[in-house]
Image (cartoon, coloured by chain):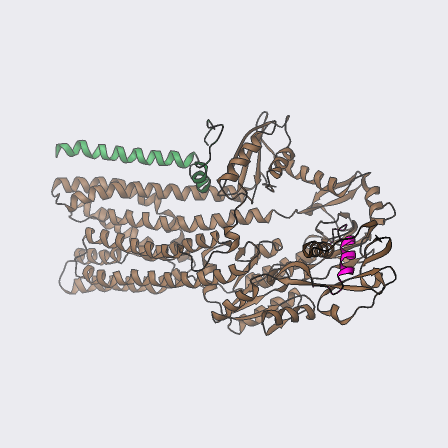
Amino acid sequence: MGCCPADAAVALAGGDLSPEAAARARRAAELDAALRETRPGVALLQLIAPGMKCGGCVASLERGLKAVPGVLSARANLTAKRLTVELDPKKARALDVADAAEKLGFETWPLEAADAADAAEKRETRDLLMRVGVAGFATMNVMLLSVSVWSGADGVTRDLMHWISGLIAVPAVAYAGRPFFASAAASLKARRLNMDCPISLAIILATLISLSEVLRSGPEAYFDAAIMLTFLLLVGRYLDRLMRARARSAASALARLQPRGATVLTADGPTWRPLEEIAPGAAVLVAPGERVAVDGEVVEGASDVDCALVTGETTPEAVAPGATVRAGALNLSGALTLRATAVGEQSSLGEIQRLMAEAESRKSRVARLADQAARIYAPVIHLVGLATFLWWLSAGADWRTAAFTAIAVLIITCPCALGLAAPMAQATAAGALFRRGVMLKDGAALERLALVDRVVFDKTGTLTAGRPVLRRPDDLHAAAAAAALAARSRHPLAAALAAWAQGAGLAIPRAEQVAERPGFGVEGLVDGAPAKLGRAAWVGAAEDAAAEEATAVWLRLGEAAPVAFLFDDAPRADAAETIAALRGDGLSVEILSGDRAGPVAALARRLGVESWRAGATPEEKIAHVAALSQAGGKVLMVGDGVNDAPALAAASVSMAPAAGADVGRAAADMVFFGEALAPVAEARATAVRTRRIILQNFAIAGGYNLIAVPLAMMGYASPLVAAVAMSTSSLLVVANALRLQAAPTQPAPSALAEAPA
Amino acid sequence: MSNLLFLIPAALFLGGLGLAAFIWSLKSGQYDDLDGAAERILHEDDDAGDDGR
């Protein structure tokens, strides 16, 4: 096809560089950049393999990669979905490893060696686990010593026990309690009270009063309470962190699915350049099937581009020299050469990111449940402590006894269960959601999701599967002829037509001399008659009304009148049920799309949604969501495209399908996997249950205090009572939170799908 | 009283041993891949003498 201008551009660019070879060369360069030499002759390669799902995958990957010549060791990490491969750079290339993984059925992406944030994250998690371990060790030993004191040790023996307890507990509290002290100090500096303030106060006071008791050989030391409080709360903190780390590692795996660069035409032929190094005016090559990385003007070539992720339009747009193309569009049929017009902050993507940052900064942060509870709880217990002190003084006790009792009140009203109540419930809920294909970025999003009263859906790629499906044609003979031509094209509409014909069992005639005309369609001889399949104008047909609601492709066979084939962007299989479920939950549902009014209205009718808006630009989407929030609404935004990203950031809480644009995924609070829309309703149901359980947990913790506080105020709060109250209320709270693990509904099909072992 | 002088150090020593074992396991990456480790045991491996990192 040397006549095609696009082919000429590629030929000019680098001899016989086919799109496949260019993509491969680029991949090799990306992979080699991720190689890091650890010792002479040994290089370390880290890859992300999101497809890894079970032990079978781990075993087959490790065995398969070790069989590659030059690979020294291979280790798969199932939790982080990562592969760590050591290879001899002289004998093997990074591309060999990636190819071997691909042959086993796993797509891989290189993990940049200089992922500093990731390393720091891992170090902090380990650091926290170390504190949990130290606190656990100290708790066990101090408890052991305390038991002997409670069972009747007195005199010198009791003093000895107290001294040893103190020697273990004081350094352990100082080391293990630092996360709480640091957070409380930061919150006080900002003139706010968070949960860590009463926690830190209780821990520090318990330690100090116990030290003073030991120094004067007193009978009651609260070292066990102080260290146990620290230990239990650290466990809650660790769970919270583990949940977020897990979501983050899955998110970073997704973020790397799209290459951040493009093939640029330079003096030495086409080379792959990262996005930051592409200047305006550079000639950028875009192969068919590739996403456009920069905004640009078409210089050479003709093709169809799919802007579904950029604008939400479902119908591919034909482009020819002079047309502008925006970053994020998918090039479908022909090779294009673009002149980059704007890169970085000036590009349309940069504009989207600016809108997102603005939305983020304007978003009012809803206080988290635990902090809300702390704001009421902390002043109350501090006042109760003060009241106890004054009451005992006025009753004639010396100031020491009065202070001791007041501090005992503060210890026994242990915010321990309160500190565990929210993180434990959220970590359990996040784990349950993760197994059902919803990735949660942090626990606060669940709290916001529970309060939502309105759901705004994007259309293309969110409510719909983002893939065209052929409407049943009347003329099956024409359909068979069209399928014969369509089978030779990679255009998604052609692929849908061919797939439908195959599924319907049509006898497909022979097609000869088939040639693709990028931007127009396919032509050739079907059963000896000249045939054209493509755009209306090219085929010689007049657009008619039916094309308003659907995308049309026309066939002209011989001299017969042109026949139209209509395609719908079919909704996800469970879209109607999900919307019904959300409605049944008392939420109002609306559609906000960038697509034309016809298809949006058709889909809204089909799904039974009355409120819809079409043709919305990113600015209009964000304005709409902001207006809803201003009117007091709490909006859940569900969208996948680049154009949805600012609205996702502006909404009270947001979800994006994993197959969407990376900016959208980055902006969303939750990402869901798979073909089903059900995860949206499931996440909402789980959020509501989580909120209920957190409130129950607060009630349990509060109920304990109703019994314990009067006892403590009367001076009966011995260290034994404190220890028992603390551990039972914590156990109850944890057990209650674990109820979230049970599935409320049937698990989504995506969670049931097992990878081939 | 005198047996306490023997028992308390013994208890602390054993507890310390547990702590040391925990710190070792943390440093050697035993907690890095909890899901994978659970699955790994179900698969018979030809090269069982893997370095076990």
x and y percent of residue A77 in the render?
50, 39
Above or below, comparing residue A624 to residue A338 in the picture: below
Question: Residue at the spot x=69%, y=57% of the render?
Answer: A504
A753 lies left or right of A689: right
x and y percent of residue A380 in the render?
30, 65
A652 lies left or right of A468: left
Look at the image and give the colour of chain A.
Answer: brown
x and y percent of residue A250 in the render?
53, 48
The answer to whether residue A634 of the structure is visible from this angle is no
Look at the image and give the colour of chain B.
Answer: green
A654 lies left or right of A721: right
Task: Name the image quarter holding residue A531.
Answer: bottom right
Does residue A480 show up magenta in the picture? yes
Question: Residue at the spot x=80%, y=64% of the render?
Answer: A563
The answer to whether residue A150 of the structure is visible from this angle is yes
The residue range painted magenta reads: A472-491
**A317 or A323: nearer the viewer:** A317
Task: Name the image quarter holding residue A356.
Answer: bottom right
**A10 or A600: nearer the viewer:** A600
Task: Name the image quarter holding residue A533.
Answer: bottom right
